[in-house]
Image (cartoon, grey):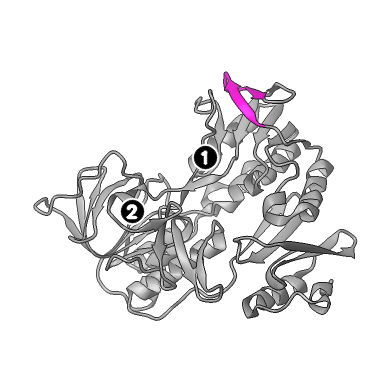
Amino acid sequence: MNAAQDTTGPSPTDDSTRAALLVIGGGPAGLAAATAYRDHGGQGEVVLVSDDDTAPYLRPPLSKDYLQGETAEPDLALAPESDYAEKSITLRLDTMVTAISADEGRARLSDGTQIAFDRCVIATGNAPVTLPVPGADDPRVAYLRSLEQARRLREEAGTARSAVVVGSGFIGCEAAVTLARRGLEVTVCSTEEIPQAQRLGTDAGERIAGWLREEGVRLLGGVEVTAITDGRRVELDEGGPLEADLVLVAAGATPRSTLAVAAGIPAEQGRVLVDEHMASEVPRVFAAGDVAMAYNTGAGRHLAVEHWGEAEAMGTIAGTTAAGGDASWDSPPGFWTVIGDHTLKYAAWGDGYDRAELVDHGDGAFTVWYSTDGVLVGVATHDADDDYESGGQAVLRGDRADPAVSAGTGS
């Protein structure tokens, strides 16, 4: 839904349909916004425009159950088809919004039509980062964000014997284990020496590395990809090259904010700047999910998050506010990741820490407490759900990271 190719804005004289609420984006934030608007009494036409070819669907299974072949596409649906009719939500799929004029309340679509709107929620999400190296844009190189990309990856995994995964983020780690369980010989190469060490710290990263090795995944850390040849050969700055039947790049994501920026909507760090109600500085325009830089009243500052659950929560807030309700963002962002048989839960403000303290509960269970200047700012757990629940509340309260708190419950 980026609009780099069309920044002139829609013409107010063109024919258009009218929507009380226009939602741009078919991910969790977009659907949550449309649904919450209706649930809180929002009247008028609701139109959700998505450049995806499928109605809103679950994305977390794409790197796990769906890739494994255990989940069918119909089971991914975020809502039954009947819900859209019951809530009078019109879907415009396989269509891009190419320009918006917030002042005039109009949006131009890629099919040449226009939509006049009273309120607009921008929920365009993010897009996979294409490695800035020769060959990374080869169509044979796989990326994983959409169902269309997941279909292709699952099909190719069915005939491949080996795979290289570039990147040790959560999608990369999840997909690596899934591919290994499908019988592929899998290598993960990453600029990080240890998976997720920058985000979660060395101790937690070492645990994740151990989970990958348990599944037979080979790890190559601290290396840079310099080129990808013929979509199958990964050149490295040290060692290598790595050759495989399948190359998956999971090197992060970038917010899809071009449309908003082209419309003159203020942004920060490539994300639409919004308050705790998901309202932008431009009247009638909201933003939610990965594309938003939203103010969190609990943190007392703007935060950038890329978590599925937070996208839904932010979308709900945006839709509620657009309908005239009262909702605000105040809780620490959290997410779960499932790597093989291991579930890691994490709740944190997500913008850094100066100390990470791991508590080992035995039998593989652990808690990591994160603090800045002695104040708790995050918690990560594995098989320590009580710590996850109490830790999130402690982060919200701004508790001190004293020994009693850091000891955790271990249950």
Residue 21 found in image quarter: bottom left
In this rendered view, identify the residue nearer to me: 5 or 29. 5
The secondary structure making up most of the magenta span is strand
Q: Is residue 204 left or right of residue 319?
A: right
Regarding residue 382, the answer to whether it shows in the image is no
Estimate the x, y position of residue 256 in percent, counting from the top left: 42, 48
Amino acid type indicated by mark 2? Ala
Tell me the magenta residue range: 224-236
Q: Mark on residue 129?
A: 1
- The answer for how far apart the CA atoms under marks 2 and 1 are is 19 Å
Q: Is residue 153 left or right of residue 215?
A: left
At mark 1, the secondary structure is: loop
Q: Residue at x 70, y 32 (%)?
A: 223
Amino acid type indicated by mark 1? Val
Estimate the x, y position of residue 276 in percent, counting from the top left: 44, 72
Regarding residue 242, the answer to whether it shows in the image is yes
From the image, tell me which residue sits under label 2: 260
Estimate the x, y position of residue 329 in percent, counting from the top left: 49, 73
Q: Reading the chain from its start, which is encountered first: label 2 or label 1?
A: 1
Estimate the x, y position of residue 188 in percent, counting from the top left: 71, 36
